[in-house]
Amino acid sequence: MNVLVVGGGGREHALCWKLAQSPRLTRLAAAPGNPGIAEHAELVSIQADDVTALTGFARNQRIDLTFVGPELPLSKGVVDVFQDNDLPVVGPSADQARLESSKSFAKHFFKSNNIPTAEFIECATPAEAYCVIESSKWPVVIKADGLAAGKGVVIAEDADQARSTIRHFMESKSLGEAGSKLVIEEYLEGQEASFHVFADGTYYQPMVAAQDHKRRFDGDQGPNTGGMGAYSADTILSPEQHSAVLSGIIEPTLKAAKSYAGVLYAGLMLTSEGPKLLEYNARFGDPETQVLLPRMKSDLLPLLEATIDGKIERCAIEWDTRAAVTVVLASGGYPGKYESGKSISGLDQAAKLEDVQVFHAGTKRDGSEVKTAGGRVLSVTALGSTLETARARAYEALSRIHFENCHYRRDIALNAVTTNVTELL
């Protein structure tokens, strides 16, 4: 098969790395890709949201399957255009992708379908938002309605922080039009979890769970980011929680969102009252993909085909029982202003370690050098027989990588390791 992967981040590098292992693959292309992806695929100079150019390439190059990684082209209707041109593509329509592209649409969808979620109020103007926080119980969660690359959620601890967030999002337009409308919702206590499924419009197949670390600094401090690391282990969800997620969240969603096909990612809060839905992403998460795919023993390509052909129910997914941990190396200043063009060293040394993969996100090639080209630069992923082993291996690998003003969290999966050790004692 000739396959095209749309996107150029760490998620797409992990996807290309996994697809390149398929015995059914003839040709793999990535648009636009990155230097890490170039080790597995042909890079195509088309931006991920250039729907017209992507359609033309897939048609002219006889691409048998296209997988759309990022949220922006999905929200712009790339799947609709591909389907109109009889081009096989994995992903939901623009209308279905509103589960991610509009927080207010999603919250009303949750409530109308009795899916457990936080209470919320939609605010269309700054005046409405300021009025809501006057009677809020702190902390509150303030979400930009539109797509904001993981930067559109603020947990406001008090009224001053809430007012500042409203000013930045709605009045200063720090997120562009994404912040022109807000959702203000109650703060939920508990552990977060990321839960993905493959869906074909009727049936679904669940993947193993993961946990993302969104806050910038150790101890879950600082601003939200696109994700500073993640881990995946079979201990994240209990059997009871797993069953509750499927029956109370995933199944009613897919029943109501008729014909939803592709990947659906549920961001969950595991509360004392049971799992509650924070938000949906209409695609693979990043950096969750970087810990999920290394644990997937099955060939990914037939699973993607099955979401198009309506045959996902016939598929079985085999998973590695080992844990996986990924740590994101970011440019100094991220998620705010940061400098690019810093030379990266040690990539080869890190990749030589056993059960380690280094996935590129914000990188570029400059002659013989690989340099930084984004906020999140690399994801270093390791497998281990225990979560503690995987974690130690990931940090050993990243210690060999260097670039100016490199920043990363030192506590990815640490709480989970500590909890496991305490339970054993």
Image: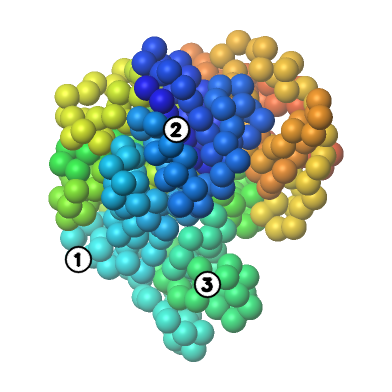
Q: Mark 3 points at which residue?
A: 177
Q: What residue is rendered at 15% in x and 41% in y?
A: 202
Q: Position of residue 330 (x, y in %)?
A: 70, 42
Side (left or right) of 234 relative to 222: left
Q: Which amino acid does label 3 sit on?
A: Glu
Q: Which of 63 and 94 is in front in this view?
A: 63
Q: Position of residue 332 (x, y in %)?
A: 77, 47
Q: Name the residue under label 1.
A: 112
Q: What residue is rendered at 42% in x and 79% in y?
A: 123
Report the label total.
Answer: 3
Mark sitting on residue 61 = 2
Give the mark nearest the N terminus, 1 or 2: 2
Q: Where is residue 341 in the image (x, y as percent from the top left)?
A: 81, 42
Side (left or right) of 191 relative to 254: right
Q: Which residue lies furthest to the front in this view?
A: 60
Position above or below: 71 against 422: below
Q: Sort mark 3 into few (<14), some (14-19) or many (20+) by Cα contacts within 10 Å.
A: some
